[in-house]
Image (cartoon, rainbow, N blue to C red):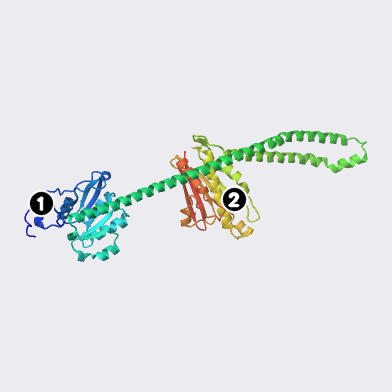
Amino acid sequence: MSNKSSKPEPDKKIDDLIILEDEDLIFLEEEETEESPVRGIGNTWAILIVDDDPSVHQATKLALKNLEFEGKGIEFIYAYSGAEAKKVLHSNPDIALALLDVVMETNDAGLEVVRYIREDLNNRKVQIILRTGQPGEAPEESVIINYEINDYKLKIDLTRQKLVTTTIAALRAYQNIATIERQTEELAHALQLLQDTQLQLVQNEKMAMLGNWAAGVAHEINNPVGFIRGNISAAQEHLQDLLTAISLYGEHSNLPDEIVEKLEDLELEFIAEDFPKLIGSMEEGCDIIRNISTSLRTFSRTDTANKTKFNLHDGIDNTLLILKYRLQANEKRPAIKIIKNYGNIPEVKCYPGQLNQVFMNVFANGIDALDESNGDKSFEEIEKEPNQITIETEFSADKQSVILKIADNGMGMPEELKARVFEQGFTTKGVGKGTGLGMAIAHQIVIEKHSGKIRCDSTVGAGTTFTIVIPR
Protein backbone atom coordinates (compact mmCIF):
# COMPACT_ATOMS: atom_id res chain seq x y z
CA MET A 1 0.00 0.00 0.00
CA SER A 2 1.21 3.51 -0.78
CA ASN A 3 -0.94 5.27 1.81
CA LYS A 4 -0.25 3.09 4.88
CA SER A 5 0.45 6.08 7.12
CA SER A 6 -2.64 8.07 6.11
CA LYS A 7 -5.83 7.76 8.20
CA PRO A 8 -8.96 6.89 6.19
CA GLU A 9 -11.56 9.62 6.02
CA PRO A 10 -14.62 8.95 8.22
CA ASP A 11 -17.15 9.16 5.37
CA LYS A 12 -15.18 6.97 3.04
CA LYS A 13 -16.55 3.42 2.57
CA ILE A 14 -13.94 1.04 3.99
CA ASP A 15 -13.74 -2.54 2.72
CA ASP A 16 -10.11 -3.14 3.61
CA LEU A 17 -8.77 -6.39 4.95
CA ILE A 18 -9.68 -7.26 8.53
CA ILE A 19 -6.01 -7.88 9.27
CA LEU A 20 -4.39 -4.46 8.95
CA GLU A 21 -0.79 -3.35 9.07
CA ASP A 22 0.47 -1.69 12.27
CA GLU A 23 0.21 1.77 10.70
CA ASP A 24 -3.49 1.19 9.99
CA LEU A 25 -4.18 0.77 13.73
CA ILE A 26 -4.05 4.57 14.15
CA PHE A 27 -7.68 4.71 12.98
CA LEU A 28 -8.74 1.68 15.04
CA GLU A 29 -7.30 3.04 18.28
CA GLU A 30 -10.35 5.26 18.57
CA GLU A 31 -12.46 2.10 18.99
CA GLU A 32 -13.12 0.75 22.48
CA THR A 33 -10.83 -2.22 23.09
CA GLU A 34 -11.88 -3.23 26.60
CA GLU A 35 -13.85 -6.42 27.02
CA SER A 36 -17.57 -5.67 27.18
CA PRO A 37 -19.94 -7.67 29.37
CA VAL A 38 -22.89 -9.36 27.74
CA ARG A 39 -25.86 -7.08 28.45
CA GLY A 40 -28.56 -9.48 27.42
CA ILE A 41 -28.30 -12.55 25.25
CA GLY A 42 -32.04 -12.50 24.64
CA ASN A 43 -31.87 -9.11 22.87
CA THR A 44 -28.51 -9.49 21.13
CA TRP A 45 -26.35 -12.02 19.34
CA ALA A 46 -23.32 -12.97 21.42
CA ILE A 47 -20.17 -13.30 19.32
CA LEU A 48 -16.94 -14.54 20.85
CA ILE A 49 -13.70 -13.27 19.32
CA VAL A 50 -10.72 -15.44 20.22
CA ASP A 51 -7.34 -14.17 19.03
CA ASP A 52 -4.02 -13.31 20.65
CA ASP A 53 -3.69 -10.22 18.43
CA PRO A 54 -5.59 -7.18 19.84
CA SER A 55 -5.78 -5.62 16.38
CA VAL A 56 -7.94 -8.52 15.19
CA HIS A 57 -10.38 -7.83 18.02
CA GLN A 58 -10.48 -4.16 17.07
CA ALA A 59 -10.91 -4.79 13.37
CA THR A 60 -13.63 -7.41 13.89
CA LYS A 61 -15.57 -5.13 16.20
CA LEU A 62 -15.24 -2.26 13.74
CA ALA A 63 -16.58 -4.43 10.92
CA LEU A 64 -19.54 -5.85 12.82
CA LYS A 65 -20.47 -3.28 15.46
CA ASN A 66 -23.47 -1.88 13.54
CA LEU A 67 -24.66 -5.23 12.24
CA GLU A 68 -28.24 -6.25 12.99
CA PHE A 69 -29.89 -9.56 12.20
CA GLU A 70 -33.54 -10.37 12.84
CA GLY A 71 -33.87 -7.13 14.81
CA LYS A 72 -31.05 -7.90 17.22
CA GLY A 73 -27.65 -6.28 17.46
CA ILE A 74 -24.27 -7.73 18.37
CA GLU A 75 -22.63 -8.21 21.76
CA PHE A 76 -18.89 -8.93 21.69
CA ILE A 77 -17.06 -11.17 24.14
CA TYR A 78 -13.28 -11.29 23.97
CA ALA A 79 -10.67 -13.93 24.72
CA TYR A 80 -6.96 -13.67 23.96
CA SER A 81 -5.94 -17.31 24.37
CA GLY A 82 -7.39 -20.77 24.08
CA ALA A 83 -7.43 -21.22 27.85
CA GLU A 84 -9.31 -17.96 28.34
CA ALA A 85 -11.75 -18.92 25.59
CA LYS A 86 -12.66 -22.13 27.43
CA LYS A 87 -13.52 -20.20 30.59
CA VAL A 88 -15.66 -17.75 28.63
CA LEU A 89 -17.48 -20.52 26.78
CA HIS A 90 -18.17 -22.37 30.01
CA SER A 91 -19.70 -19.23 31.56
CA ASN A 92 -21.66 -18.14 28.45
CA PRO A 93 -23.59 -21.11 26.99
CA ASP A 94 -25.65 -18.81 24.73
CA ILE A 95 -22.78 -17.69 22.53
CA ALA A 96 -24.01 -17.89 18.95
CA LEU A 97 -20.75 -17.55 17.02
CA ALA A 98 -17.09 -18.11 17.85
CA LEU A 99 -14.56 -16.40 15.54
CA LEU A 100 -11.57 -18.48 16.51
CA ASP A 101 -7.88 -18.09 15.77
CA VAL A 102 -6.00 -21.35 15.29
CA VAL A 103 -2.46 -20.49 16.39
CA MET A 104 -2.24 -18.71 19.75
CA GLU A 105 -0.33 -19.87 22.84
CA THR A 106 0.23 -23.14 20.94
CA ASN A 107 0.01 -24.08 17.28
CA ASP A 108 -3.27 -25.94 17.85
CA ALA A 109 -4.79 -23.84 20.65
CA GLY A 110 -7.81 -22.97 18.51
CA LEU A 111 -8.35 -26.58 17.52
CA GLU A 112 -8.28 -27.56 21.18
CA VAL A 113 -11.03 -25.00 21.84
CA VAL A 114 -13.10 -26.61 19.05
CA ARG A 115 -12.69 -29.99 20.69
CA TYR A 116 -13.63 -28.50 24.08
CA ILE A 117 -16.83 -26.97 22.66
CA ARG A 118 -18.01 -30.04 20.82
CA GLU A 119 -16.90 -32.78 23.23
CA ASP A 120 -16.52 -31.39 26.76
CA LEU A 121 -19.42 -28.92 26.56
CA ASN A 122 -21.35 -31.09 24.08
CA ASN A 123 -22.41 -27.88 22.36
CA ARG A 124 -23.51 -28.49 18.78
CA LYS A 125 -25.37 -25.22 18.48
CA VAL A 126 -22.64 -22.57 18.56
CA GLN A 127 -21.22 -21.79 15.13
CA ILE A 128 -17.44 -21.99 14.84
CA ILE A 129 -15.48 -20.13 12.20
CA LEU A 130 -11.73 -20.72 12.29
CA ARG A 131 -9.52 -17.85 11.16
CA THR A 132 -5.84 -18.30 10.61
CA GLY A 133 -2.98 -16.23 9.35
CA GLN A 134 -0.68 -19.25 9.25
CA PRO A 135 -2.41 -21.87 7.07
CA GLY A 136 0.61 -24.11 7.03
CA GLU A 137 0.26 -24.77 10.75
CA ALA A 138 -3.23 -26.20 10.27
CA PRO A 139 -3.99 -27.34 6.71
CA GLU A 140 -7.58 -26.54 5.73
CA GLU A 141 -8.56 -29.98 4.44
CA SER A 142 -7.26 -31.78 7.52
CA VAL A 143 -9.04 -29.37 9.88
CA ILE A 144 -12.40 -29.63 8.12
CA ILE A 145 -12.20 -33.44 8.09
CA ASN A 146 -11.12 -33.89 11.70
CA TYR A 147 -12.88 -31.03 13.50
CA GLU A 148 -16.56 -30.15 13.68
CA ILE A 149 -16.40 -26.56 12.48
CA ASN A 150 -18.73 -24.51 10.31
CA ASP A 151 -16.17 -22.62 8.23
CA TYR A 152 -12.43 -22.11 7.85
CA LYS A 153 -11.04 -18.83 6.54
CA LEU A 154 -7.68 -17.26 6.00
CA LYS A 155 -7.53 -13.88 7.74
CA ILE A 156 -6.30 -12.22 4.58
CA ASP A 157 -9.44 -13.41 2.77
CA LEU A 158 -11.88 -11.93 5.26
CA THR A 159 -12.66 -8.44 4.04
CA ARG A 160 -15.18 -6.45 6.02
CA GLN A 161 -18.02 -7.31 3.65
CA LYS A 162 -17.12 -11.00 3.58
CA LEU A 163 -16.97 -11.06 7.37
CA VAL A 164 -20.46 -9.51 7.57
CA THR A 165 -21.82 -12.05 5.09
CA THR A 166 -20.16 -14.96 6.88
CA THR A 167 -21.45 -13.74 10.25
CA ILE A 168 -25.05 -13.39 9.04
CA ALA A 169 -24.94 -16.90 7.57
CA ALA A 170 -23.60 -18.25 10.87
CA LEU A 171 -26.23 -16.43 12.94
CA ARG A 172 -28.97 -17.73 10.66
CA ALA A 173 -27.67 -21.29 11.10
CA TYR A 174 -27.48 -20.80 14.88
CA GLN A 175 -31.05 -19.47 14.92
CA ASN A 176 -32.29 -22.44 12.87
CA ILE A 177 -30.63 -24.92 15.22
CA ALA A 178 -31.99 -23.07 18.25
CA THR A 179 -35.48 -23.13 16.74
CA ILE A 180 -35.24 -26.86 16.04
CA GLU A 181 -34.01 -27.52 19.58
CA ARG A 182 -36.84 -25.45 21.06
CA GLN A 183 -39.43 -27.20 18.91
CA THR A 184 -37.92 -30.57 19.83
CA GLU A 185 -38.15 -29.72 23.53
CA GLU A 186 -41.74 -28.56 23.10
CA LEU A 187 -42.64 -31.75 21.25
CA ALA A 188 -40.89 -33.87 23.89
CA HIS A 189 -42.77 -32.01 26.62
CA ALA A 190 -46.06 -32.41 24.75
CA LEU A 191 -45.36 -36.13 24.23
CA GLN A 192 -44.53 -36.58 27.91
CA LEU A 193 -47.69 -34.71 28.89
CA LEU A 194 -49.71 -36.88 26.51
CA GLN A 195 -48.19 -40.06 27.92
CA ASP A 196 -48.79 -38.91 31.50
CA THR A 197 -52.39 -38.03 30.67
CA GLN A 198 -52.90 -41.36 28.92
CA LEU A 199 -51.41 -43.17 31.89
CA GLN A 200 -53.63 -41.22 34.27
CA LEU A 201 -56.71 -42.03 32.22
CA VAL A 202 -55.80 -45.72 32.13
CA GLN A 203 -55.20 -45.73 35.87
CA ASN A 204 -58.43 -43.85 36.64
CA GLU A 205 -60.43 -46.10 34.35
CA LYS A 206 -58.84 -49.22 35.83
CA MET A 207 -59.44 -48.10 39.41
CA ALA A 208 -62.99 -47.00 38.66
CA MET A 209 -63.76 -50.32 36.98
CA LEU A 210 -62.12 -52.27 39.79
CA GLY A 211 -63.95 -50.18 42.38
CA ASN A 212 -67.33 -50.79 40.79
CA TRP A 213 -66.60 -54.48 40.39
CA ALA A 214 -65.35 -54.87 43.96
CA ALA A 215 -68.28 -52.93 45.41
CA GLY A 216 -70.73 -55.12 43.47
CA VAL A 217 -68.98 -58.35 44.43
CA ALA A 218 -68.73 -57.29 48.07
CA HIS A 219 -72.42 -56.45 48.14
CA GLU A 220 -73.40 -59.76 46.55
CA ILE A 221 -71.13 -61.69 48.93
CA ASN A 222 -72.28 -59.90 52.07
CA ASN A 223 -75.95 -60.72 51.63
CA PRO A 224 -75.70 -64.55 51.50
CA VAL A 225 -72.80 -64.62 53.95
CA GLY A 226 -74.82 -62.58 56.40
CA PHE A 227 -77.75 -64.90 55.91
CA ILE A 228 -75.64 -68.02 56.47
CA ARG A 229 -73.78 -66.53 59.43
CA GLY A 230 -77.01 -65.47 61.07
CA ASN A 231 -78.63 -68.91 60.69
CA ILE A 232 -75.68 -70.99 61.88
CA SER A 233 -76.39 -70.20 65.53
CA ALA A 234 -80.08 -71.05 65.11
CA ALA A 235 -79.21 -74.31 63.36
CA GLN A 236 -76.87 -75.24 66.19
CA GLU A 237 -79.59 -74.57 68.79
CA HIS A 238 -82.15 -76.61 66.86
CA LEU A 239 -79.74 -79.51 66.50
CA GLN A 240 -78.94 -79.43 70.20
CA ASP A 241 -82.63 -79.61 70.98
CA LEU A 242 -83.05 -82.60 68.65
CA LEU A 243 -80.08 -84.41 70.14
CA THR A 244 -81.48 -83.87 73.64
CA ALA A 245 -84.89 -85.16 72.61
CA ILE A 246 -83.42 -88.24 70.93
CA SER A 247 -81.27 -88.95 73.97
CA LEU A 248 -84.30 -88.80 76.24
CA TYR A 249 -86.28 -90.91 73.86
CA GLY A 250 -83.57 -93.55 73.87
CA GLU A 251 -83.69 -93.92 77.63
CA HIS A 252 -87.09 -95.67 77.50
CA SER A 253 -86.69 -99.45 77.73
CA ASN A 254 -89.88 -100.36 75.88
CA LEU A 255 -88.77 -99.01 72.49
CA PRO A 256 -89.12 -101.30 69.51
CA ASP A 257 -85.93 -103.10 68.49
CA GLU A 258 -85.95 -101.32 65.10
CA ILE A 259 -85.74 -97.89 66.78
CA VAL A 260 -83.09 -99.04 69.21
CA GLU A 261 -80.90 -100.30 66.37
CA LYS A 262 -81.35 -97.04 64.44
CA LEU A 263 -80.36 -94.97 67.46
CA GLU A 264 -77.26 -97.09 67.90
CA ASP A 265 -76.35 -96.63 64.22
CA LEU A 266 -76.60 -92.83 64.55
CA GLU A 267 -73.68 -92.66 66.98
CA LEU A 268 -75.29 -89.80 68.84
CA GLU A 269 -72.23 -89.17 71.02
CA PHE A 270 -70.02 -88.66 67.95
CA ILE A 271 -72.58 -86.33 66.33
CA ALA A 272 -72.91 -84.34 69.54
CA GLU A 273 -69.12 -83.93 69.64
CA ASP A 274 -68.43 -83.33 65.94
CA PHE A 275 -71.32 -81.14 64.87
CA PRO A 276 -70.22 -78.07 66.89
CA LYS A 277 -66.85 -78.37 65.13
CA LEU A 278 -68.64 -78.33 61.77
CA ILE A 279 -70.57 -75.25 62.82
CA GLY A 280 -67.34 -73.60 63.95
CA SER A 281 -65.71 -74.28 60.58
CA MET A 282 -68.70 -72.81 58.80
CA GLU A 283 -68.51 -69.70 60.98
CA GLU A 284 -64.79 -69.39 60.25
CA GLY A 285 -65.45 -69.72 56.50
CA CYS A 286 -68.06 -66.95 56.70
CA ASP A 287 -65.56 -64.72 58.51
CA ILE A 288 -62.91 -65.37 55.83
CA ILE A 289 -65.36 -64.50 53.06
CA ARG A 290 -66.38 -61.37 54.94
CA ASN A 291 -62.71 -60.37 55.36
CA ILE A 292 -62.12 -60.85 51.64
CA SER A 293 -65.13 -58.67 50.93
CA THR A 294 -63.80 -56.01 53.29
CA SER A 295 -60.35 -56.24 51.66
CA LEU A 296 -61.89 -55.74 48.23
CA ARG A 297 -63.66 -52.61 49.38
CA THR A 298 -60.53 -51.30 51.14
CA PHE A 299 -58.24 -52.07 48.22
CA SER A 300 -60.44 -50.42 45.62
CA ARG A 301 -61.63 -47.55 47.77
CA THR A 302 -62.30 -44.30 45.95
CA ASP A 303 -59.85 -41.68 47.13
CA THR A 304 -61.07 -38.27 48.20
CA ALA A 305 -59.68 -35.00 46.87
CA ASN A 306 -57.43 -34.74 49.93
CA LYS A 307 -54.98 -37.22 51.34
CA THR A 308 -56.05 -39.26 54.36
CA LYS A 309 -54.19 -41.12 57.11
CA PHE A 310 -53.56 -44.74 56.14
CA ASN A 311 -51.82 -47.75 57.64
CA LEU A 312 -49.58 -49.10 54.89
CA HIS A 313 -49.43 -52.52 56.53
CA ASP A 314 -53.20 -52.83 56.11
CA GLY A 315 -52.85 -51.93 52.44
CA ILE A 316 -50.13 -54.53 51.92
CA ASP A 317 -52.06 -57.23 53.78
CA ASN A 318 -55.27 -56.52 51.87
CA THR A 319 -53.42 -56.64 48.57
CA LEU A 320 -51.77 -59.96 49.45
CA LEU A 321 -55.15 -61.39 50.43
CA ILE A 322 -56.56 -60.50 47.01
CA LEU A 323 -53.50 -62.05 45.33
CA LYS A 324 -53.63 -65.17 47.50
CA TYR A 325 -54.84 -67.29 44.61
CA ARG A 326 -51.64 -66.47 42.70
CA LEU A 327 -49.43 -67.22 45.70
CA GLN A 328 -50.89 -70.65 46.38
CA ALA A 329 -49.28 -73.88 45.20
CA ASN A 330 -50.26 -75.30 41.83
CA GLU A 331 -49.29 -78.27 39.71
CA LYS A 332 -46.08 -76.54 38.55
CA ARG A 333 -44.66 -75.11 41.77
CA PRO A 334 -45.06 -74.94 45.56
CA ALA A 335 -46.68 -71.91 47.19
CA ILE A 336 -44.75 -68.64 47.07
CA LYS A 337 -43.56 -67.85 50.56
CA ILE A 338 -44.32 -64.36 51.91
CA ILE A 339 -41.84 -63.07 54.52
CA LYS A 340 -43.00 -59.98 56.41
CA ASN A 341 -40.46 -57.91 58.33
CA TYR A 342 -42.75 -55.12 59.42
CA GLY A 343 -41.20 -52.25 61.33
CA ASN A 344 -42.84 -49.79 63.69
CA ILE A 345 -44.14 -47.25 61.20
CA PRO A 346 -46.73 -44.48 61.58
CA GLU A 347 -49.72 -43.89 59.37
CA VAL A 348 -49.00 -41.71 56.35
CA LYS A 349 -51.11 -39.09 54.63
CA CYS A 350 -51.76 -40.48 51.17
CA TYR A 351 -54.31 -41.66 48.64
CA PRO A 352 -54.85 -45.22 49.95
CA GLY A 353 -56.53 -46.57 46.83
CA GLN A 354 -53.66 -45.42 44.65
CA LEU A 355 -50.98 -46.85 46.94
CA ASN A 356 -52.87 -50.15 46.99
CA GLN A 357 -52.62 -50.08 43.21
CA VAL A 358 -48.84 -49.62 43.55
CA PHE A 359 -48.60 -52.62 45.90
CA MET A 360 -50.72 -54.70 43.53
CA ASN A 361 -48.52 -53.87 40.54
CA VAL A 362 -45.24 -54.51 42.38
CA PHE A 363 -46.42 -57.82 43.87
CA ALA A 364 -47.86 -58.98 40.54
CA ASN A 365 -44.57 -58.08 38.87
CA GLY A 366 -42.67 -60.12 41.48
CA ILE A 367 -44.96 -63.14 41.07
CA ASP A 368 -44.51 -63.01 37.30
CA ALA A 369 -40.74 -62.80 37.75
CA LEU A 370 -40.73 -65.85 40.03
CA ASP A 371 -42.90 -67.90 37.67
CA GLU A 372 -40.61 -66.96 34.80
CA SER A 373 -37.48 -67.81 36.78
CA ASN A 374 -38.83 -71.30 37.55
CA GLY A 375 -38.61 -72.13 33.85
CA ASP A 376 -38.39 -75.88 33.36
CA LYS A 377 -37.50 -76.64 36.99
CA SER A 378 -39.35 -79.53 38.58
CA PHE A 379 -41.62 -79.16 41.60
CA GLU A 380 -38.96 -80.80 43.77
CA GLU A 381 -36.18 -78.49 42.49
CA ILE A 382 -38.22 -75.42 43.33
CA GLU A 383 -38.95 -76.81 46.80
CA LYS A 384 -35.22 -76.91 47.52
CA GLU A 385 -34.91 -73.19 46.72
CA PRO A 386 -38.43 -71.89 47.42
CA ASN A 387 -39.89 -68.89 45.65
CA GLN A 388 -40.32 -66.07 48.10
CA ILE A 389 -41.24 -62.40 48.35
CA THR A 390 -39.83 -60.44 51.26
CA ILE A 391 -41.50 -57.27 52.56
CA GLU A 392 -39.66 -54.87 54.84
CA THR A 393 -40.96 -51.62 56.27
CA GLU A 394 -39.17 -49.03 58.39
CA PHE A 395 -39.37 -45.47 59.58
CA SER A 396 -36.71 -43.26 57.99
CA ALA A 397 -33.87 -41.98 60.17
CA ASP A 398 -35.12 -38.40 59.87
CA LYS A 399 -38.67 -39.48 60.81
CA GLN A 400 -40.03 -37.79 57.69
CA SER A 401 -40.98 -40.78 55.56
CA VAL A 402 -41.79 -44.49 55.52
CA ILE A 403 -39.58 -46.88 53.53
CA LEU A 404 -40.91 -50.09 51.99
CA LYS A 405 -38.82 -52.75 50.30
CA ILE A 406 -40.43 -55.53 48.28
CA ALA A 407 -37.95 -58.13 47.05
CA ASP A 408 -38.24 -61.37 45.10
CA ASN A 409 -35.60 -64.06 44.63
CA GLY A 410 -36.27 -64.48 40.93
CA MET A 411 -33.85 -64.30 38.03
CA GLY A 412 -33.25 -60.54 38.23
CA MET A 413 -32.67 -58.19 35.32
CA PRO A 414 -29.62 -56.94 33.42
CA GLU A 415 -28.79 -53.24 33.64
CA GLU A 416 -30.32 -52.32 30.28
CA LEU A 417 -33.71 -53.76 31.27
CA LYS A 418 -33.62 -52.33 34.79
CA ALA A 419 -33.10 -48.85 33.34
CA ARG A 420 -36.38 -49.14 31.44
CA VAL A 421 -38.54 -50.83 34.07
CA PHE A 422 -40.65 -47.70 34.71
CA GLU A 423 -40.91 -46.76 31.04
CA GLN A 424 -44.45 -46.59 29.74
CA GLY A 425 -45.19 -49.38 27.26
CA PHE A 426 -42.04 -51.35 28.14
CA THR A 427 -42.50 -54.97 29.21
CA THR A 428 -40.30 -58.04 29.40
CA LYS A 429 -43.30 -60.36 29.20
CA GLY A 430 -44.37 -62.18 26.08
CA VAL A 431 -46.95 -60.94 23.60
CA GLY A 432 -50.36 -60.71 25.24
CA LYS A 433 -48.97 -61.18 28.75
CA GLY A 434 -48.06 -57.62 29.65
CA THR A 435 -49.18 -54.08 28.84
CA GLY A 436 -46.10 -52.19 29.99
CA LEU A 437 -48.31 -49.95 32.13
CA GLY A 438 -48.14 -51.53 35.59
CA MET A 439 -44.78 -50.18 36.75
CA ALA A 440 -45.23 -46.91 34.85
CA ILE A 441 -48.47 -46.35 36.79
CA ALA A 442 -46.71 -47.24 40.04
CA HIS A 443 -43.95 -44.75 39.25
CA GLN A 444 -46.42 -41.98 38.46
CA ILE A 445 -48.45 -42.58 41.64
CA VAL A 446 -45.40 -42.56 43.92
CA ILE A 447 -43.51 -39.70 42.27
CA GLU A 448 -46.22 -37.34 41.08
CA LYS A 449 -49.12 -38.05 43.44
CA HIS A 450 -47.18 -38.56 46.65
CA SER A 451 -43.88 -36.70 46.07
CA GLY A 452 -42.13 -39.92 47.01
CA LYS A 453 -39.43 -42.07 45.48
CA ILE A 454 -39.37 -45.50 43.88
CA ARG A 455 -36.22 -47.33 42.85
CA CYS A 456 -35.51 -50.67 41.25
CA ASP A 457 -32.38 -52.63 42.17
CA SER A 458 -31.76 -55.91 40.41
CA THR A 459 -28.97 -58.42 40.03
CA VAL A 460 -29.07 -61.16 37.42
CA GLY A 461 -29.53 -64.48 39.19
CA ALA A 462 -30.22 -62.87 42.58
CA GLY A 463 -33.61 -61.21 42.24
CA THR A 464 -35.13 -57.74 42.22
CA THR A 465 -35.93 -55.23 44.96
CA PHE A 466 -38.31 -52.28 44.67
CA THR A 467 -37.74 -49.57 47.27
CA ILE A 468 -40.63 -47.16 47.84
CA VAL A 469 -40.35 -44.04 49.99
CA ILE A 470 -43.57 -42.27 51.03
CA PRO A 471 -43.40 -38.96 52.95
CA ARG A 472 -45.48 -38.75 56.12
Q: In front: 47, or 281?
A: 47
Residue matched to label 1 = 27
Tell me the element at label 2.
strand
Left/right placement of residue 1 relative to residue 293 reads: left
* Point 75% across, 33% down: residue: 234
| Labels 1 and 2: the sequence-earlier one | 1
Circle 2: is it few (<14), some (14-19), or many (20+) Cα within 10 Å?
A: some
- The quarter holding residue 371 reads bottom right
Q: Where is residue 224 in the image (x, y as percent from the top left)?
A: 70, 37
Left/right placement of residue 3 relative to residue 127 reads: left
Circle 1: is it few (<14), some (14-19), or many (20+) Cα within 10 Å?
A: few
Q: In front: 432, or 369?
A: 432
Tell me the element at label 1.
helix
Q: Where is residue 303 in the image (x, y as percent from the top left)?
A: 53, 36
Question: Mark 1 and mark 2: span between their CA atoms?
Answer: 89 Å
Q: In front: 23, or 52?
A: 23
Is residue 80 visible in the rendered image? The answer is no
Left/right placement of residue 281 relative to residue 351 reads: right
Tell me the amino acid under the disc marked 2.
Lys
Q: Quadrant of the N terminus?
A: bottom left
Residue matched to label 2 = 337
* Point 61% across, 49% down: residue: 326
Is residue 267 visible in the rendered image? The answer is yes
Would you place residue 241 above or below residue 328 in this image? above
* Point 59% across, 50% down: residue: 337
Q: How many marks?
A: 2
Q: Position of residue 116 (x, y in %)?
A: 28, 57
Q: Where is residue 312 in the image (x, y as percent from the top left)?
A: 53, 40
Single out the mark in the foreground, 1 or 2: 1
Tell me the amino acid under the disc marked 1.
Phe
Would you place residue 142 above or below residue 294 in this image? below
